[in-house]
Amino acid sequence: MGMKSKFKNFFFVEDEEEYVEDYVDEQPDETPAVRQNKKAPQKQNVVSLQSIQKSSKMVLLEPRMYAEAQDIADNLKNHRAVVVNLQRINKDQAKRIVDFLSGTVYAIGGDIQRVGTDIFLCTPDNIEVSGNITDFINEE
């Protein structure tokens, strides 16, 4: 190879691509599990059940004033479901708390549902709630 061709090969990439085939010698008496154990370790997508159990907590709260709404929001941010009983607070403050929690739940991608008279279930995005509770109003 001359100096000119060495110089050309150094600066220019050839258009040819080199294909290499790997030949795996498999013995017919091996099961797929045995062959897999012989391969190099692969990264597996495994989730620990303990981490799921830790994240699925439920907190029951009965706020007495609007200032406690932030504590409820902190529980939601920590991936805990919260049942909020607003029966012992005046209606104006209860409405403000529900509005605040609605914004919090929206921001974290969760959900808020009424489960009773002045009782709400707020859930973060890691907890799924199925079904619904219909309102039954006693006309007395």
Image (cartoon, rainbow, N blue to C red):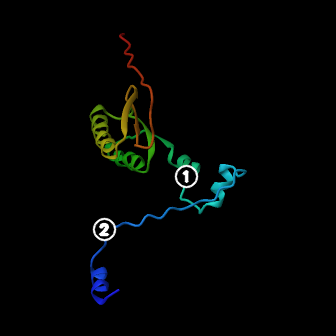
Is residue 74 shown above or below 14? above
Kind of residue at badge 2 = Asp
Extreme-front residue of the structure: 1
CA neighbours of label 1 inside 10 A, class few (<14), some (14 to 19), many (20+): few
Where on the picture, by quarter, is residue 120?
A: top left
Residue 70 horizontal/vertical position (percent) = 35, 48
CA neighbours of label 2 inside 10 A, class few (<14), some (14 to 19), many (20+): few
Mark 1 → mark 2, Cα distance in angstroms: 42 Å
Q: Which residue is tagged 2?
A: 15
Where on the picture, by quarter, is residue 110?
A: top left
Q: Is residue 123 left or right of residue 27?
A: left
Residue 43 horizontal/vertical position (percent) = 53, 59
What residue do we see at 44% from left, 33% from top?
Answer: 129
Number of the label disc, if any, that sits on residue 131: none
What residue do we see at 44% from left, 40% from top?
Answer: 82
Residue 79 horizontal/vertical position (percent) = 44, 47
Is residue 140 shown above or below 48? above
What residue do we see at 59% from left, 62% from top?
Answer: 41
Where on the picture, by quarter, is residue 36?
A: bottom right
Residue 138 horizontal/vertical position (percent) = 38, 13
Q: Which residue is tagged 1?
A: 46
Extreme-bottom residue of the structure: 3
Q: Nearer the viewer, mark 1 or mark 2?
A: 2
